[in-house]
Amino acid sequence: MKVSYNWLNKYFDGKLPPPEAAAEAFTFHAWEIEDVEKIEGDTVLDVKVLPDKSMWGLSHRGIAKDLSVILNLPLNNDPLTKAPALETGPTINITLDSDNCRRFAAAHISGVKVGPSPEWLKTALQAIGQRSINNIVDASNYVMFDLGQPSHAFDAKQVGAEGFKVRHARVGEKLTGLDGIEYTFTNDDTIIARNDNNEILSVAGLKGGQHSGISDDTSEVIVEVANWNPITTRKTGQRLKLRTDASARYENGIVPEMVPYGLRAVVDLIIEIAGGEVKGFSEVTKGTTATKTVSVTLSKINSVLGVSLTTDAVSSIFDRFNWQYKTTGEEFEITPPFERTDLTIPEDVIEEVGRIYGYQHVTAVTPETTPLTVINKRFYYSELVRDALISQGFSEIFTSSFRAKDEIKIANALASDKGYLRSSLRENVKDALQKNAPNADLLGLRQICLFEIGTVFNSSGEHLMLSLGVQSPSGYKAKLDDPTLAAALKSLGDALQQTIEAESENGVLEINLGALIDQLPSVSNYQDREKPHDVTYHPFSTYPAIARDIAMWADANDKEDEITSILKETSGPLCARITLFDRFEKDGRTSYAFRIVFQSNDRTLTDVEINSIMDGVYKAIQEKGFEVR
């Protein structure tokens, strides 16, 4: 949020330290200052307001209040100290036909003169990047950035004598906003309409309509200040691709109790700079914020923060916040101000104490070393499973816990193909086998052997599962698949000292590892495990590989190393791997068959250039006296 230093200083009667010192104070008390910029006699601080403080921190008053606590410098005039008086009356009819509006208030002002804003107001808005429009609209914007409460001014003639109706939009209804864009609504959207003919006046919490806005001919205005449901405001804004300064504040949960403060401030400022007379106020309330007390003990504060504060020290911090609280021995019972809905549990209060006291006073303490008495069974035995399978040539994979369709549907899908939790690892392993098959030649593998250890979810709960998969590069079931799985199961049984049996389906099997581990004894110390070998990692190419086979006769049966050396030398830098995949003897000669895999790091190879390389390979093999088959 852009914060004007001069604007802040009005809350301190000019007693603030220099802007740089104020920015430093914020930084050391949990506020991030993203930029400090000098602008024509002012300094603008770009304050990063985190979500947990946005319901009160997206305002100059909120920032000023926190700065007053940090600096122990009381506010000169806090507008939230005393509830404003609204002389309610039958001036404006308000009908609430939607639960998305928790409070709605309006004021009718007659005799206003629309024109340019005074220089002080223009300067204040321009400093934080806002364009001056006219005195009525500027007054509304100023109060929003000052107190954090949005408002909207309508031309009273466009509202009509019967006032407002807050309702759900009808499917297909349209409104041209003040930005000149036409918006089309669904029944999930909340709008403000005329009470007499249902004509839409504005999108609730987001944007006013073009035809009901303030013009140079406006002489009577109705100022609306309301409180809108954060979730529906966000959803409507997302769907319409419309996000405004007002909606940002509603989305972050500004409380209904701010409505009268905002309305009184806007009305007073309009009368000050545009003249006019208040004909009356009207208000309808559907909900208020329940005030909850928070209890916390001194021992818990010190334990969480790692400090040794006294009761008086904590009380002095609460006094700086001007919170209402009671002390019973070492227990504090705090009643937060109505706008501080972020204070709900003891840890919230402890955080405030810690940041005001200063995190620099929290010293690092190394925990005492305690002997390990119990080892997590799942972790220990899962590591044994990994070791056993890796020793059999398997590679571990980690796949998504979400699927497009399965048993357990999640409330808020991450994507159209991630709406359900997986109930099995089997399908994920099958997908991984198919995706990795094209890389078998590049990796020099005759089989793709994969496994995954992960949690699955079904109607009976969560389960730790193990799935193994074996597939030949061609995709067809090979004679080696079943023996490979059998050898893997035997290796698992040896590692866990259990007999493990499981049926495979198309080269994939699944075991309830959690149930198996639960039957195994607890572990109090780690057994010696073989240290892993040093591994060097290299970046891999994202371009496809091309494989070529070459077979030749040799007069002796010990020529593999010599032939491999020739192939490496003549295949050149594009050769990624050479694998001997067949060897047999006949009539006193030995046949060798090699697969050469080519791949580039910067382009897709073509058959033409690989054929050219292979011509050189054939020639070199023949020159060395080998007969190419």
Image: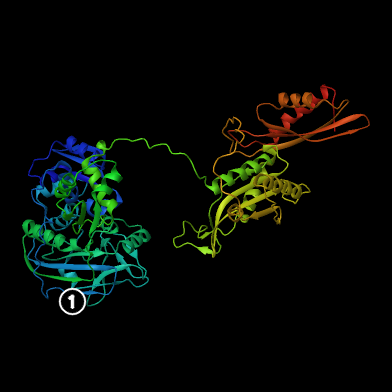
In terms of image quadrants, where is residue 426? bottom right
The answer to whether 596 appears left or right of 47 in the picture is: right
Badge 1: few (under 14), some or many (20 or more) residues near its Cα, within 10 Å?
A: some
Question: Number of numbered discs present?
Answer: 1
* 625 or 51, nearer to the observer: 51
* 160 or 548, nearer to the observer: 548
Question: Looking at the figure, which quarter contains the C terminus?
Answer: top right
In the rendering, at what x and y percent does residue 346 appear? Answer: 27, 53
In the rendering, at what x and y percent does residue 623 appear? Answer: 82, 22
Q: Secondary structure at mark 1?
A: loop
Q: Residue furthest top?
A: 624
In the rendering, at what x and y percent does residue 65 appear? Answer: 16, 48
Amino acid type of the residue that numbered disc 1 sits on in the rendered structure: Glu
Q: Residue at x 26, y 44 (%)?
A: 302
Examine the rendering and report whether any part of residue 285 can be seen: yes
Q: Residue at x 75, y 51 (%)?
A: 477
Q: Is residue 138 above or below residue 539?
A: below
Identify the image's colour scheme: rainbow, by chain, secondary structure or one colour. Answer: rainbow
Q: Is residue 602 above or below residue 319?
A: above
Q: Residue at x 59, y 52 (%)?
A: 517
Q: Residue furthest right?
A: 587
The answer to whether 249 appears left or right of 559 in the picture is: left
Q: Is residue 115 above or below residue 158?
A: above
Examine the rendering and report whether any part of residue 152 can be seen: no
The answer to whether 281 appears left or right of 431 in the picture is: left
In the rendering, at what x and y percent does residue 385 appear? Answer: 62, 45
Judging by the rendered image, the residue that carries numbered circle 1 is 162
